[in-house]
């Protein structure tokens, strides 16, 4: 009899415990909201939700990324990314960035690591971000303080990023160490002398592709009946809209980078 009673108790527990756990999860979901659980599931899977394109947080992230890349120390052999970056912002932006610091730091490190691998730069393994607020800091103008470890050679060193001029916003083309902004009237790229951006590649047509910024901020890429085609991220396009950084290839192998700030 006791054995049978123990078996029945075990069966009841096996059914009741999962139901209780589901009930607790439902109560927590109602109290905290679905976004909390979406983020938790994504974090457990090793991938946090991406920042919305065009958001204020995304713009701040791009400014930090580009500022570090532009101002990192350069040796004779390579560019050296800093292990720590102190970011000073206007109070409201500092509070926003602090609230999402883990997400921004993870995304920035993915981008910095990819840039370092592509360019052969030194990446310290993980770049940490320290956030502070300053009442006299203009909105949309983060000040970056790059911090390098001295190691056995001396004390840690610091370097301020150059922010004497406002950061530019919009679409840019990175081509052969040049940075060309896409103007309001659009930008024609090709090997002809009358193009806004001339590429010295015989496989490119005289007027190969045209870039223009749409009203919603996205970039329109239009192939101008080129001989060897236009490719965005290795996909051949005729008329294509881009809403984030991408690679533009003309013909066989002439590669340009489309960057949105």
Image (tube, grey):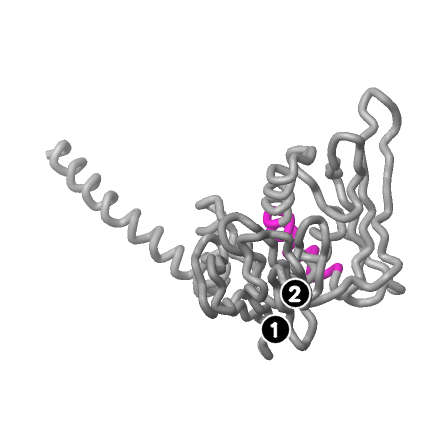
Q: Nearer the viewer, residue 161 or 74?
A: 74
Residue 171 circle label: 2
**What stretch of residues is rendered in magenta?**
94-107
Q: Nearer the viewer, residue 259 or 199?
A: 199
Find disc 1 in the rendering and name its residue.
213
Image: 67 above or below 72: below
Q: Nearer the viewer, residue 118 or 226?
A: 226
Q: Secondary structure at mark 1?
A: strand
Q: Quadrant of the N terminus?
A: top left
- Residue 237, horizontal then vertical, whole percent: 45, 63
The residue depicted at 50 percent of the width and 67 percent of the height is 223
Mark 2 touches mark 1? (CB < 8 Å): yes
- Magenta: main secondary structure: helix
- Residue 229, horizontal then vertical, whole percent: 47, 59
- Residue 236, horizontal then vertical, whole percent: 43, 59
Badge 2: residue crowd in 10 Å (few <14, some 14–19, many ≥20): many
Q: Secondary structure at mark 2?
A: strand
- Residue 211, horizontal then vertical, whole percent: 59, 69
Badge 1: residue crowd in 10 Å (few <14, some 14–19, many ≥20): many
Image: 174 above or below 73: below
């Amino acid at each position: 009899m006791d054995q049978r009673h123990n078996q029945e108790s075990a069966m009841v527990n096996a059914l009741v415990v999962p139901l209780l756990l589901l009930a607790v999860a439902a109560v927590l979901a109602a109290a905290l909201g679905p976004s909390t659980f979406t983020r938790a599931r994504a974090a457990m899977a090793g991938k946090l939700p991406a920042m919305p394109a065009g958001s204020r947080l995304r713009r701040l992230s791009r400014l930090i990324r580009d500022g570090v890349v532009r101002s990192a120390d350069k040796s004779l052999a390579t560019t050296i990314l800093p292990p720590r970056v102190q970011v000073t912002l206007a109070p409201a932006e500092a509070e926003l960035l602090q609230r999402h610091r883990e997400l921004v730091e993870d995304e920035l490190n993915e981008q910095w690591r990819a840039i370092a691998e592509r360019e052969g730069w030194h990446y310290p393994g993980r770049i940490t971000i320290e956030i502070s607020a300053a009442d006299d800091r203009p909105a949309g103008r983060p000040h970056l303080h790059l911090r390098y470890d001295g190691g056995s050679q001396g004390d840690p060193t610091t370097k301020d990023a150059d922010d004497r001029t406002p950061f530019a916003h919009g679409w840019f083309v990175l081509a052969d160490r040049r940075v060309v902004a896409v103007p309001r009237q659009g930008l024609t790229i090709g090997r002809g002398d009358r193009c806004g951006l001339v590429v010295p590649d015989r496989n490119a047509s005289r007027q190969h592709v045209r870039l223009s910024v749409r009203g919603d901020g996205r970039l329109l890429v239009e192939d101008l009946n080129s001989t060897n085609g236009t490719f965005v991220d290795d996909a051949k396009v005729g008329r294509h809209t881009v809403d984030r950084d991408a690679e533009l290839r003309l013909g066989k192998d002439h590669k340009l980078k489309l960057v949105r700030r």
